[in-house]
Image (cartoon, helix red, strand yellow):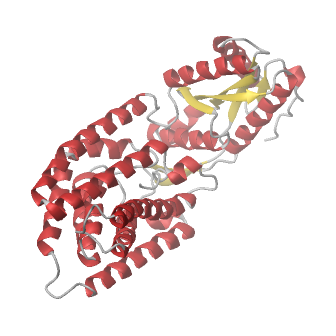
Amino acid sequence: MDDPSPAPGIRSLWALGPGLVVVALSVELVAVVVVAAGVLALPPGGGPVLLALGLAAMGVVHTELATGIERIRRRGSANSYFDLSSVWTFAAALLLPPGLAAAVVVVVYAHLWHRVWAPAGIPLYRHLYTTATVLLAARAAHDVVSWAGGLPADPARPDVVVAVGLAVSSYVVVNTVLIGAAIALTGPRVAPRDLLGRWDDNALEVATLCMGALAAVALASTPGLVVLVLPPILVLHRAVLVRQLEQDASTDAKTGLLNVTAWRAEALRAVRRAHRAGCGAGVLILDLDHFKVVNDTHGHLAGDDVLSAVAAELRAGVREHDLVGRFGGEEFVVLLPDLPRGGAGHVELWRVAERLRHRVARLDVGVATAGGVQTVTGLSVSVGGATVPTDGTTLDQVLRAADDSLYAAKGAGRNLVRIATDGHVPAPRRPTA
């Protein structure tokens, strides 16, 4: 699993803050020490070098066969990214001495960098950190299997079977903890899904490691059978790509939020759930004030960076299960399920809208321009809101009521919140310049 994409323009580890720098360099230093200790402990003659070369070669062939798919996945991954090369790194951890297993990891990931990560524009510091976490995870898996006498061994022995299962767990835990520690330092509020990865991503990782264990057993008994691992792993690549393409089709490319089609589909389901549960739901429409000035002053690429930064603030300012989407241009929309009905729902919706408005007003966005990096400040949003079922029983009715409220906020001077049937909430004062 890899850490989230950095903010626009950040290509250096040093720009991410001292905490993340300390963690990254510490993990990489520990990995170097562990690898050096493994190399020094190699048996006379170097150990099973031919087996290590074979695993490294299989990893390279695997990457070459899946290069096109992996580049698409790598470019499209907004948060976490699980590569399937752990088939070979995990097999190396089970079969080889630590020094040779580390060599296999380095060869496989160096080739991945050359063929997948670098062409996809991924910063080198991210690849180095990921490689370090894989080295430590592989060492943890090796130590667990060594406890049972190592492989090759009689696979029918219960302790060997248990040890391989524990090795899978240790590999996942070490990798997840180290990546999660880095992700936790990338922002003040990080969702658990980003820290731990999604359920299906973790299931993919476990499935890949299980295939690596089967590859190790095949190499230990009948080495020629290891080639049978390639067809299913390549099919798995394509299955994962289809899932990612489906996700990309529902995501706005500039902001990473739901696009209008996907947001409407999810919002319709949320409104139906609210009716069945007898609770309310709220809709906010937010329009970035005077956004044309940003484009005219700094350029459209800088405008895209501003949209991305505003989207991140909106996503961070609501609950995990709230729906945030981009309606097009500089307009965003939020659906908040599970609100109380009536006036209490209006008050809660107004509080959320005010919180989002203040978050955007405090936002400073660094953008790259022809004259160098500049900071865009003074951003603001006008917000209109409405609730189900007070202001409408269908999604379209509530959207129209929220849109009318948005135009009321813009007509009153912008950088304001207006909620349908405003008598239910205290009228916010217009902020001074």
| Residue 425 relative to residue 57: left or right | right
Q: Nearer the viewer, residue 52 or 311?
A: 52
Task: Name which residue lies at 30% across and 49% down.
Answer: 120
Whether residue 327 appears in this view of the structure is yes
Q: Nearer the viewer, residue 144 or 193?
A: 144
Task: Name which residue lies at 52% across and 30% down.
Answer: 258
Task: Name which residue lies at 12% across and 60% down.
Answer: 223
Locate residue 282, reporting x and y percent. 72, 25
Relative vertical location of residue 13 with respect to residue 288 in this rendering, above or below: below
Relative vertical location of residue 68 with respect to residue 418 in this rendering, above or below: below
Residue 250's quadrant in the figure?
Answer: top left
Whether residue 118 appears in this view of the structure is no
How many marks can you see? 0
Locate residue 201, reporting x and y percent. 42, 45
| Residue 45 relative to residue 32: left or right | left
Locate residue 204, reporting x and y percent. 38, 46
Q: Nearer the viewer, residue 280 or 424?
A: 280
Residue 232's quadrant in the figure?
Answer: top left
| Residue 346 relative to residue 111: left or right | right
Locate residue 299, reporting x and y percent. 46, 39
Task: Name which residue lies at 30% across and 81% down.
Answer: 38
Q: Work out which quarter of the rendered image holds the C terminus and state it.
A: top right
Q: Work out which quarter of the rendered image holds the N terminus and state it.
A: bottom left
User: Residue reaching furthest front?
Assistant: 157
| Residue 166 relative to residue 285: left or right | left
